[in-house]
Structures are given as structure tokens and as C-alpha cells.
Amino acid sequence: MADFDETALAVADVYAHSLFELADGQNAVDTVAAELDELAATLEAQADFATFMASRAVDIERRANVLEKLFRGTLSDLLLNTLLVMNDKGRSELAGELRARFRARLDEKHQRSEARVTTAAPLSDDQRRRIADVLRERTGREVAVTERVDDSLLGGLVVEIGDELIDGSVSWRLKRLRSALLEHGQQEMTQLRKAAIEA
């Protein structure tokens, strides 16, 4: 996903709020959430489509016509109309962020959280269950765990849940150890210099 400034993210949140309220009023929240998941997966898997949605060089009317042809009848009118309004306002690049903001509202409604867990190797079913249990105890909510493998971690895991980051990776521990050793070495050098001056 592209990096957005806080103003753009706030705008995405406004669209997500409106879409959520409309969907909730029509008992279509789960349907819209599933459609947003598919849209986000498409944006991630198809770089050309993501570029098309984000590019300022694409004419607003042309993008609207393409959205109509691609999604009229396959997406709910609620979601498609939201995408068209975002396009009209020059905010179609926030389509992916719309999903994250909508999901956050759905999780809040159901008193659950989404945790993104990054590990050096794939999790077993038992590890996944234990992580979910620990996070449930910590947050007091049901926690849906999504996983990502990053072999640069060496071992351990990194958990992102809401705005909180829990870094229990081996690479992070090694960085802390290195920093502590450097600091200890600098303190010893300072004491040796001081002793040499006083001698």
C-alpha cells in the first residue's frame, strides 16, 4: 500500500464511516466487507489496476467508465457508488485504505481486533491458537490473526495490533544486545580515559 499523509487517511476514514453507516442500515456490512477484501486483494495482486486507481494522469470520467464496466452488477451498489464518489473527488487512490478503515469499524462493532503477525517461518495451528489466546487475554477481545513470513527476523515474531507494535523477534533482540554492548564499551572507555588523566 502507498504511504499516505494523515489528511488523506482521515479522508479515507470519512468515506469508510459513511459506507459503514449505509451498509449497516441495509444489513449489508458483511457483504460490503467481503467485497472490500476482494477489491484490496485485486489491488495488491494487479499492479496495473492499482496504478490505474492511484494515477492522477487518468481522467476522472475514464476511470468512472472503467469502474462501471468492471464492477456494476458484481459489487454492491453501496460500494461501487462509494468508489465513484471517491473518484469524482480525486480520491480513488484511497480505495485500498477504505478497506482497512471499514474493517476497523466492523471489528469495533463486533468487539474484535485484527493482529498482523510476522514470523521467520510459517506458524503451526497450535502456535496460531496460542498467539490468538494470548492476544485475546491482553485485549479482552476476539482476535483475528493474519500472518506474514519474513526470514530476515531470524526467529521470534512481530505483532501489530491496532496502533501497538510488539517486537519479539531475534533480530530486534540482537539489535538491543548490540546497543547495550556498545554503550557498555563506551562507558568503559570513558572510565579508562578518566583514570589515565588522573594518573
Image (cartoon, grey):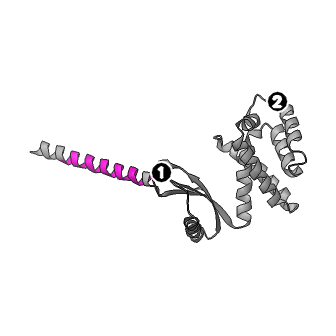
Q: Residues within 10 Å of mark 2 (few under 14, many from 20)?
A: few
Look at the magenta stretch and give its main secondary structure. Answer: helix
* Amino acid at pointer 2: Asp
Give the number of the mark in front: 1 or 2.
Answer: 1
Q: Over which residues does the magenta segment extend? A: 172-191
Q: Which mark is residue 24?
A: none
Question: Where is mark 2, residue-wise?
Answer: 59
**Quadrant placement of the C terminus:** top left
- The percent position of residue 101, horizontal first and vertical second, equals 71, 53
* Left or right, 73 with reference to 120: right
Residue extending farthest left: 199
Q: Residue at x 85, y 36 (%)?
A: 66
Image position, residue 104 (x, y; %)? 70, 57
Residue at x-position 65% and y-position 44%: 6
Say if residue 76 shows up in the picture: yes
Q: Is residue 108 left or right of residue 22?
A: left
Quarter holding residue 67: top right
Query: Which of the two labelled residues, at mark 1 and mark 2, occupies the earlier sequence position?
Result: 2
Dot 1 amino acid type: Leu
Q: Which mark is residue 153?
A: 1
User: What is the total number of numbered labels drawn onto the structure image?
Assistant: 2
- Kind of element beneath mark 1: helix
* Residue 177 sits inside the magenta stretch: yes
